[in-house]
Image: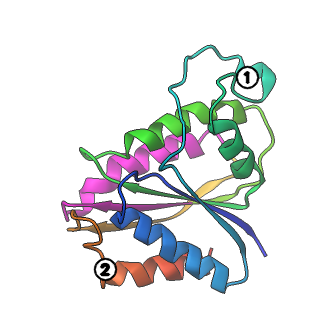
Amino acid sequence: MKRVIVISTSLRQGSNSDMLADKFVEGAKAAGHDVEKISLAGKNIQFCKGCLACQKLGRCVINDDVNDIMAQVMKADVVAWATPIYYYEMSGQMKTLIDRMNAMYPLDYQFRDVYLLTTAAEGEEHVCKRAETGLTGWIDCYPKSRLAGHLFCGGVGAPREIDGNDKLQAAYDMGHNA
């Protein structure tokens, strides 16, 4: 049994990327894993101030929701990120969280496999590449981890437009095989 954390970064109700996250969760639970989904909707996540105090303290000095999220990520075996693609990149709240998790850099971490689930109104395969590059930049700072998979569903812009799409089953399968 693995400890799986799924971070859904969309703030929109009924978002397509959140629906992919839910299917990943469903698949991972069906495989017998201990799964927790963290939605950034309603979370207080402030911008990094660049003070680097986190490198000495092992936590951020800003008193918001990031330290709790970071603690959960540190203990996970698998981390899955779900994000809508905005202007050919990950959501701003995902990037802000990644920046704020700088405190993890000098610490020991459990996660090995990292997954990326992305959705966009545009359907071309290149649409999600910058988001993948951004996430692999984070992963590169944790050499015991790797990008284990990336699932992209394009052509879905409106809330819940992904309903009935084959990529939902693919997300389930990815979670099941995590």
Q: Is residue 145 visible?
A: yes
Disc 1 on helix, strand or loop? helix
Residue 55 numbered mark, or none: 1
Quarter of the image with the C terminus is bottom right
Q: Is residue 90 left or right of residue 41?
A: left
State the residue at coordinates (39%, 63%). 17
Kind of residue sitting beneath label 1: Gln
State the residue at coordinates (40%, 79%). 168
State the residue at coordinates (36%, 78%). 167
Q: Is residue 21 left or right of residue 16?
A: right
Camera-near label (2 vs 1) is 2
Residue 175 is inside the magenta segment: no
Kind of residue sitting beneath label 2: Asp
The residue range painted magenta reads: 115-142
Residue 163 numbered mark, or none: 2
Furthest residue toward top: 51
Question: Which residue is more in the foreground, 174 or 45?
Answer: 45
Q: Position of residue 140 (x, y in %)?
A: 59, 42
Q: Is residue 171 left or right of residue 62?
A: left
Q: Position of residue 142 (x, y in %)?
A: 67, 43
Question: Which residue is more in the foreground, 125 or 61?
Answer: 61
Q: Is residue 144 visible?
A: no
Between the residue at mark 2 and the residue at mark 1, the CA separation in whole angstroms equals: 43 Å
* Residue 7 against residue 50 in the figure, above or below: below
Q: Position of residue 49 (x, y in %)?
A: 55, 17
Question: Which residue is more in the foreground, 43 or 74?
Answer: 43
Residue 120 is inside the magenta segment: yes
Q: Residues within 10 Å of mark 1 (few under 14, many from 20)?
A: some
* Residue 98 against residue 19 in the figure, above or below: above
Q: Are marks 2 and 1 in contact (CB under 8 Å)?
A: no
Q: Position of residue 60 (x, y in %)?
A: 69, 27
Disc 2 on helix, strand or loop? loop
